[in-house]
Image (cartoon, rainbow, N blue to C red):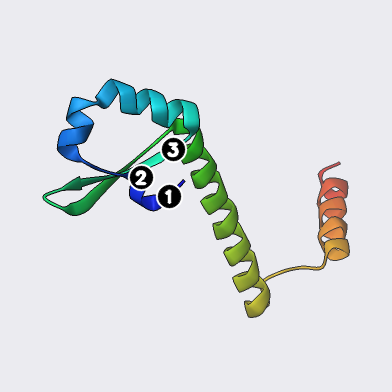
């Protein structure tokens, strides 16, 4: 899909709302809506939006993991399991 096909004015959206919603939903399209010639909002189907949010969450976790590793804020897996076993043993 070409980006130029995804840009619509707000007046076009108002005039063709049901048609655009069906197209966006069925084809998982993303539209850029303009007002006075300036891009203002993105209209996207829910499934694509949720996928984007999940991807962003994973990227944030990956960035946090990289940061923690760089700063030395991590434990070796074997040590973590030893700590867990020790805590369980102390609870008994």
Give the labeled residue for mark 2.
5
**Quarter occupied by residue 18:** top left
Per the rendering, the mark at residue 71 is none
Q: Which residue is mark 3?
A: 29
Q: Is residue 89 left or right of residue 20?
A: right
Residue furthest to the bottom in view is 71
Label 3 element class: loop
The residue located at (88%, 63%) in the rendering is: 78
Q: CA distance from mark 1 to mark 2?
A: 5 Å
Q: Are marks 1 and 2 in contact (CB under 8 Å)?
A: yes
Front disc: 2 or 3: 2
Mark closest to the chain's N terminus, 1 or 3: 1
Above or below, 79 against 88 in this view is below
Q: Tell me the crowding category of disc 2: few under 14, some 14 to 19, or many 20 or more residues within 10 angstroms, Cα based.
A: few
- The residue wearing badge 1 is 2
Residue 54 position in % (x across, y down): 55, 45
- Disc 3 residue crowd, few under 14, some 14–19, many 20+, Cα 10 Å: some
| Of marks 1 and 3, the one in the foreground | 1
Q: Quadrant of the C terminus?
A: top right
Q: Is residue 1 left or right of residue 14?
A: right
Q: Are marks 2 and 3 in contact (CB under 8 Å)?
A: no
């Amino acid at each position: 899909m070409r980006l130029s096909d995804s840009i619509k004015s707000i007046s076009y959206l108002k005039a063709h709302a049901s048609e655009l919603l069906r197209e966006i939903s069925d084809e998982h399209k993303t539209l850029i809506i303009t007002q006075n010639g300036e891009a203002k909002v993105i209209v996207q189907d829910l499934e694509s939006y949720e996928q984007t949010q999940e991807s962003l969450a994973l990227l944030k976790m990956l960035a946090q993991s990289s940061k923690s590793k760089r700063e030395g804020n991590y434990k070796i897996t074997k040590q973590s399991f030893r700590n867990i076993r020790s805590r369980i043993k102390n609870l008994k």
